[in-house]
């Protein structure tokens, strides 16, 4: 009897976790995709759900539909020139009387984003029109400030993200890189992080900023107690105004989700930007500490965080231009990759991120290395396992891969890899997700319900078998 009970427990322990894992593996993100002929006011392809990854490009979606024999697509110069419905033969061809436009979530994008990553789009529509579709300036900048992506950079980001997921690290940079590469962080880490930090009082600005960035990368908004505690601390604590790297990190943390500061904040964004500008030297570079010579790393970091304020402040815009000039001159004279204690791959990746965020073309000759663009140079540092080496010919390095992933994210998405979303957007998305989950729960049984039903059935069968065996033994004895 005891042996049978032990066997039952072993069977139960194996069946239960397997069922749970199976239910979570079935989740697949999808978008609604359609091809519309605006000239004739009819669909070439009716709206259909398509399973994709957020790192997929718009062209990749078209190619997947072609592989599934739903569409026939002709690509020229990185955008579609002809699309036809495989079943009906309905064809649209780009010519003088009409061209293809891309709309995501009812917003027309400019014509250079076909290779951009889909990101958080939920409705994708390819529109063929004889009349030019107006591209709202604000919308196009938000969706595609400046992208220099191609199929190689999209693929490189995906491979590097997979490498990171196999080499876990509990650091702020790792959390940011995983988020930037659209990889899922460990659910246990994400779930326990705010509770771990909630009762810990920040001891200094550097630690508070790093913890806030980590929480932000995990998707937590200002309504989370651990997040609000660190915002309040950074708003009122004493920040060393002579430490450029510290000011950069505090600004980066506050801007990562556009967190709101208290009305009586001492360390406002304006104050922090002013303190950072005071560290700019006459050569255009920024110093790590007041009175020191310019640091390429700190200069690139300053360009990154100040890019969010350049359109509103002419002084900041001029400071960024001078910093960009300093970087280009340094690159042309003795080579940027040899002018810092950081690895050449990390400084190269940081330069790409800074250029993209300030809408500076990375293919500009001023930033080339041995007549090779920094993007091509960076891609050469990726190993076969997907990771990036710190120096040419070396093994894949965590820090090099993390920084490279942030640069590739900037290339593919056209925005700062350190800004995840605004607080308003985050809360809106959460509300939509919760509403959708509630509707789903009302209309159909959840996967966990079926798991418990199955487990319950197994338990009942095992109990019946044990009772029958016990009865059989008693009869045999009598």
Image (cartoon, rainbow, N blue to C red):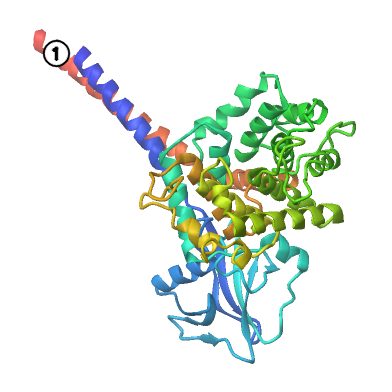
Q: Nearer the viewer, residue 97 or 381?
A: 381
Viewed as shown, does residue 337 lie left or right of 133?
left
In the image, what residue occupies the spot 28% across and 28% down? 461
In the image, what residue occupies the spot 80% across and 39% down? 260
Neighbour tally class for label 1: few under 14, some 14-19, many 20 plus, Cα within 10 Å = few
Q: Nearer the viewer, residue 232 or 351?
A: 351
User: In the rendered image, is residue 217 in sight?
Assistant: yes
Q: Is residue 133 above or below residue 289?
A: below
In the image, what residue occupies the spot 61% across and 57% down? 333
Quarter of the picture containing the N terminus is: top left
Which residue in the protein does label 1 denote? 473
Residue 38 is situated, as x and y percent measured from the top left of the image, at 65, 82
Q: Nearer the viewer, residue 144 or 219?
A: 144
Residue 253 is situated, as x and y percent measured from the top left of the image, at 70, 38
Quarter of the picture containing the C terminus is: top left
Q: For the image shown, how many numbered marks are present on the structure?
A: 1
Viewed as shown, does residue 475 lie left or right of 286?
left
Viewed as shown, does residue 218 lie left or right of 201?
left
Name the outermost residue toward the bottom. 96
Name the outermost residue toward the right. 264
Q: Is residue 207 above or below residue 419?
A: above
Viewed as shown, does residue 351 lie left or right of 464?
right
Name the outermost residue toward the front. 333
Say what secondary structure mark 1 lies in.
Answer: helix
Residue 139 is situated, as x and y percent measured from the top left of the image, at 73, 64
Q: Is residue 253 above or below residue 65?
A: above
Q: Is residue 167 above or below residue 105?
A: above
Q: Nearer the viewer, residue 65 or 243?
A: 243
User: In the rendered image, is residue 460 in sight?
Assistant: no
In the image, what residue occupies the spot 66% across and 27% down? 207
Image quarter for residue 167?
Answer: top left
Image quarter for residue 63?
Answer: bottom left
């Amino acid at each position: 009897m005891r042996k049978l009970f032990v066997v039952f427990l072993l069977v139960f322990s194996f069946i239960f976790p397997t069922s749970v894992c199976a239910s979570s593996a079935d989740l697949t993100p999808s978008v609604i995709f359609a091809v519309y002929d605006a000239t004739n006011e009819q669909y070439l392809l009716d709206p259909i759900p398509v399973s994709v990854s957020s790192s997929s490009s718009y062209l990749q979606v078209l190619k997947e539909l072609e592989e599934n024999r739903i569409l026939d697509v002709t690509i020229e110069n990185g955008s579609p020139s002809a699309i036809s419905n495989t079943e009906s033969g309905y064809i649209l061809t780009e010519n003088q009387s009409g061209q293809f436009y891309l709309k995501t979530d009812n917003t027309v994008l400019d014509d250079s984003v076909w290779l951009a990553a889909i990101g958080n789009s939920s409705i994708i529509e390819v529109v063929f029109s004889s009349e030019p579709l107006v591209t709202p300036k604000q919308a196009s900048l938000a969706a595609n400030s400046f992208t220099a992506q191609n199929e190689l950079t999209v693929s490189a980001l995906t491979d590097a993200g997979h490498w990171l997921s196999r080499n876990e690290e509990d650091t702020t940079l790792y959390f940011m890189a995983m988020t930037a590469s659209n990889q899922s962080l460990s659910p246990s880490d994400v779930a326990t992080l705010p509770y771990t930090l909630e009762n810990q009082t920040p001891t200094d600005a550097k630690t508070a900023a790093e913890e806030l960035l980590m929480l932000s990368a995990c998707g937590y908004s200002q309504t989370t107690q651990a997040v609000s505690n660190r915002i309040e601390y950074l708003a009122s604590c004493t920040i060393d105004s002579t430490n450029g790297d510290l000011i950069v990190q505090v600004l980066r943390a506050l801007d990562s989700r556009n967190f709101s500061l208290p009305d009586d904040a001492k360390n406002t964004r304006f104050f922090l930007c002013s303190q950072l500008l005071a560290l700019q030297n006459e050569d255009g570079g920024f110093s790590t500490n007041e009175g020191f010579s310019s640091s390429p790393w700190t200069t690139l970091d300053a360009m990154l965080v100040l890019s969010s304020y350049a359109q509103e402040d002419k002084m900041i815009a001029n400071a960024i231009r001078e910093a960009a000039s300093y970087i280009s001159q340094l690159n042309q004279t003795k080579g940027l990759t040899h002018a810092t204690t950081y690895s050449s791959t990390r400084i190269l990746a940081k330069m790409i991120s800074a250029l993209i965020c300030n809408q500076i073309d990375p293919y500009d000759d001023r930033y080339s290395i041995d007549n090779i663009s920094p993007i091509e140079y960076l891609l050469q540092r990726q190993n076969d396992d997907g990771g990036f080496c710190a120096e040419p010919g070396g093994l894949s390095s965590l820090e090099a891969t993390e920084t490279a992933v942030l640069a590739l994210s900037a290339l593919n998405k056209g925005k700062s890899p350190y800004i995840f979303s605004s607080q308003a957007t985050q809360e809106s998305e959460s509300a939509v997700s919760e509403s959708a989950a509630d509707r789903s729960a009302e209309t159909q049984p959840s996967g966990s319900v079926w798991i418990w039903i199955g487990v319950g059935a197994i338990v009942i069968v095992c109990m019946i078998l044990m009772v029958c065996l016990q009865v059989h033994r008693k009869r045999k004895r009598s």
